[in-house]
Amino acid sequence: MAKKKEKVVGDLRIGVYVCHCGLNISATVDVPELVKFASSLPDVIVARDYPYVCSDPGQKLIMKDIQKLGINRVVTASCSPRLHESTFRKTLQEAGLNPYCLEIANIREHCSWVHADIVKGTEKAKRLVASAVARSSLLEPLDVKEAPVTPQALVIGAGISGIQAALDIADAGFKVHLVEKEPSIGGHMAQLDKTFPTLDCSACILTPKMVQVERHPNIRLYAYSEIEGIDGFVGNFTARIRRKATFVDWDKCTGCNDCAEACPVKVPDEFNMGLSERKAIYRSFPQAVPNKFVIERDVCIECKKCQKVCKPDAIDYDMEDELVEVQVGTIVVATGFDQFNPSLKPEYGYDQYENVITGLEFERLSSPSGPTGGKILIGGREPKDVAFIHCVGSRDETVGNEYCSRVCCMATAKQAHLVKERVPQANVTVFYMDVRAFGKGFEEFYMRVKEEGVFYRRANPAEIYRRSQRLVIRAEDTLLGKTVEVEADLVVLAAGMVPNINTQAVASLLRLGRSSDGFLMEAHPKLRPVETAIDGIYLAGCCQGPKDIPDAVAQAKGAASSAIAPMARGKVEVEPITAVIDEDLCSGCRICEGVCEYGALSFDQQKEIMTVNEVLCKGCGACGATCPSGCISLKHYTDQQIMAQIGAILSHVR
């Protein structure tokens, strides 16, 4: 540890604190040498090192120097500001110093983690610290503003995640607007027969929660509706909801089913994955919430037979879409997932053979409310040989999905168990690459299924073709090291999870990012898994990435608690790092308006210049980089500060 004799240069008194980060930094950076170097920099009156600067003793060290030595600018040479910037800002604030008088030199990710040579690593660390000190000398205190919060929440999507989030927020005493695009809430969980590893009836678990949503006094349900637009900012969002015309007055509809029985038009039933048919006037499934009917006008022939038999006179062919505008303080996105389309793997013959089905189609076959009443029948007969294939559309570079869908291994184990339960004499083979039984009780369930006689074969299926009336699976057995052929009457593809088809539209609507796998991106994968880059918008369930029901529910609860917090406080702090426009230089060209992803820039018609909504602005700097007049600057990241950093780095190059 090195300490330079106190000195005062102008009004600046800079303190530099170098973190060892265990061995993360000290293994490839000579920390004592770096501290000695920092002590020699202009305006630095103290330089210290500590094993973990982010720890409580490390923070107290900084606070003590601020209070006793009059430090008014703080530089930490540590890890990424994305991880600990908020930590050190709070440290400065507790010590009585403006939190924006902090600069972080990232010598872990940018230096020690990418260099093995301690000499070169130390030299680079010196330059990074020098640039941080140079920038810190130009930092200015910023004031955090506050905005009021509307005590209502919007939840988009009403699968199990959206349902749970809505219930938790409503139970906390806040009004919730729950929007679901389908005529009924429930999502994919409503299509399942059993849940693993406990084999609970999916409907038995889900239906009570669906009923709670419908009856909760704090929840307003918008089924068969879509979000058309969202404006505003954290605490003050305005959402426009399009309630699509159902052509059935739900206030009058009793759910008696007389209309569906009278309707002559039949179309594939989406809820049953096309394995059965429904009428042009329909409800999604028997336990639907709301338990109301909808007319699909695209296929309706307007014979009006349903209208003639409807005793409550609920049929209304003149009904039109309705636009509703609501004010909310926070938003939870729970738009779920879609099943991978196995047609993209033509070698499996999904579109070619009727006895090649997906896992979700199998769920409808095995469900008592499904097209076969829970009997596993293919072509009217019970299969004697059933094969399951893992990882269809997951962990597959050829279709662009390199990630694991997480649920497929255990879902397949559950479905294999159901085959043995419903058709005991059937031979069941599971083709797998790996079995990932990561959850509570998963490994035990997997072993139970194997003991029931399900044969797990480590093999990569290459193709499926027909031989006589049966299917043949040709695969490479990776344990035996040879090609094998297995005949089957039914092949079930464990199709993985992919982002919901509307994910891009949702991302654009809410200005959210997407990760490389296409799912919505969280603010930080470890520390902020339910938050997004947009304050006040949170993620729940499979819209953020593949997960099973317990994890989806857990994340929904986390998103709900995060959404509740600002509403409970009644106000939110607004980040002061925003764009600033020099009115004397602005020409009103409006180029910046087009590049702003957050809608923070608007044109003042009277002054004929651009203005910034500081609450909406995220300080990304895109507008400043685009402005041809150079009239836009960014608080906390001014041109002078950046140039000072560059100059310091260049001046210390040997």
Image: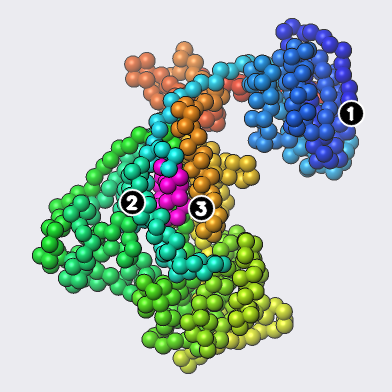
Sequence-first tag of 3 and 2 = 2
Name the residue rendered at 54%, 77% in the picture. 416
Q: Within the magenta stretch, is there residue 487?
A: no
Q: Quadrant of residue 108?
A: top right
Image spot of residue 326 (x, y percent) = 33, 37
Residue range (magenta): 154-170
> Is residue 286 shown above or below 51?
below
Q: Is residue 181 left or right of residue 387?
A: left
Sequence-first tag of 1 and 3 = 1
Q: Nearer the viewer, mark 3 or mark 2?
A: 2
Q: Judge the density around disc 3: few (<14), some (14-19), many (≥20) Cα neighbours within 10 Å.
A: many
Question: Do the residues bearing badges 1 and 3 touch, measured as CB atoms within 8 Å?
Answer: no
The residue that label 3 is drawn on is 553
Name the residue rendered at 43%, 29% in the picture. 149
The residue that label 1 is drawn on is 32
3D distance between C-alphas at marks 2 and 1: 64 Å
Q: Viewer-proximal residue, 442 or 85?
A: 442
Quadrant where the C terminus sits is: top right
Quadrant where the N terminus sits is: top right
Q: Is residue 292 left or right of residue 114?
A: left
> Is residue 23 shown above or below 567?
below
